[in-house]
Image (cartoon, helix red, strand yellow):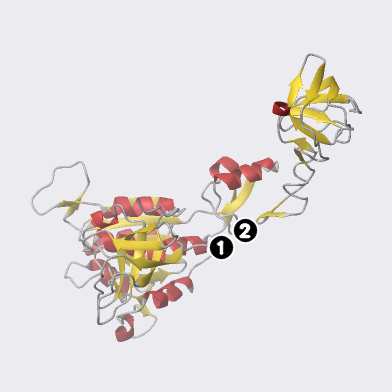
Amino acid sequence: MPIFDADLQELDRLRPPDEARRIIEGRLPRLSTERVPLLDAVGRILARDIVAPADHPPFPASTMDGFAVVAADPSPWREIIGSQPAGSMIETEVHDGEAIRIMTGAPIPAGADAVVPVESTSPAEDHVVIHQEDVRPGANIRPVGSDLRRGDLVLPAGSRLQPPHIGLIASLGIADIEVARKPRISIIATGDEVIDPGTQLEPGQIYDANRFSLATAVIDAGAEISWIGLAPDNREHLQSLIEQRMETDDIILTSGGVSMGDMDYIKAILFESPDVTVHFRKLYMKPGKPLNFATQGDTLIFGLPGNPVSSLVTFELFLRPAIGIMSGATEPDRPRVRVELTVPTTPSDRIEYQRGRVVVTNDGRLHASSTGAQQSSRLASFVGANALLVIPPRDRSYAAGEMVDALLLETPIPTSS
């Protein structure tokens, strides 16, 4: 017998997105971890805190090319007694009346307590004349531990690693780190009418867009694709494929087959499978109403709508944060901001997520407008969009100047022209 969270009427209740999100989050497993080299860690979720193993920098260093001197020495004329390159340490000590040439990043020689930049001097072969009248102790010197002290928390677990993070970790002498394993995801695009790009269209056929938009969204969210392909509208074939993917994958994504048509087999397969628990299959939102969510053990199954906009919107609202939470990310969600509508907007009978463009005005306000016609089949509405505008239902239109929420798909926000 199939397994349900509730009776059939409750299963088909239109659930608000926030409620659906809570149901999903309550069933997310945590992924195991693995160690990877730093060059393979960008975009991954850090599994353990990174703590500074030593002071950084480990020695007082010059912040520019110039001359290491005694700051209290009043004489502008100094004898050059040596040169201190980066990467080594000379044993010469600096006294009054003396200076040592020094390079950026080089350790400060003994006796010196300031660096005078080369542009403030007139150097000769054996001496240098300093034109800077006030040379203060510590000038142009980066002290020991000024960046990090031993034991400092460098990056907390749950951080999504970006290039600056990778460089910072490398500067600590750490070559590999522990990160969350990437979730394994299968993508199954359904429908006899969809075919691969690059092949000849026959009457009644369309090129498959969902596989490609979902696959790139999965990769961008930090997961890996274990299988991807087209499947015909054949119940036995689809059921066998889904059962096969349950054995190895963390998440199964299907597109299409979840509405009310006679050929919408995904909905029926999940509903009738004896070892699958169906949690909900309708949402109070537009686009994306016929989203099905089920589980089989720790495997998550998302039956996404077949319309390309609906599948991408539901991915952004539910799949992307689920991948982040499973990986231990501290910030799994897109940024959410308040924006001011620039044109009148007609609401739907459900919460609507319109593809929109958000810009920053000269006075710092966030203005937003939709990207045109919002049909769920019109994938072009995502082109140029940097946000999903959250338009709650109500019995009158939204006027220009009213405020709504927006989920930012891209940052930073561009300025208005």
Residue drawn at x 46%, y 62% is: 335
Dot 1 corresponds to which residue? 330
Q: What label does residue 257 carry, if any? A: none
Q: Are marks 1 and 2 in contact (CB under 8 Å)?
A: yes
Q: Relative to 111, is 173 above or below?
A: below
User: In the image, what residue type sits under mark 1?
Assistant: Thr
Between residue 235 and residue 34, name the one nearer to us: 34
Indicate the quadrant where residue 245 lies: bottom left
Residue 101: image location, x then y, percent: 78, 24
Q: Relative to 150, is 340 above or below?
A: below
User: In the image, what residue type sits under mark 2?
Assistant: Ala
Q: What label does residue 157 carry, if any? A: 2
Separation (CA) of disc 1 from disc 2: 8 Å
Between residue 400 and residue 317, name the one nearer to us: 400
| Secondary structure type for disc 2 | loop
Residue 151: image location, x then y, percent: 77, 54
* In this picture, residue 164 sits left or right of residue 149: left
Q: Does residue 52 appear in this view?
A: yes
Report the number of numbered marks. Answer: 2
Residue drawn at x 26%, y 70% is: 345
Indicate the quadrant where residue 409 lies: bottom left
Residue 405: image location, x then y, percent: 39, 69
Density class for disc 2 (Cα within 10 Å; few <14, some 14-19, many ≥20) is some
Indicate the quadrant where residue 88 lies: top right
Residue 323: image location, x then y, percent: 46, 61
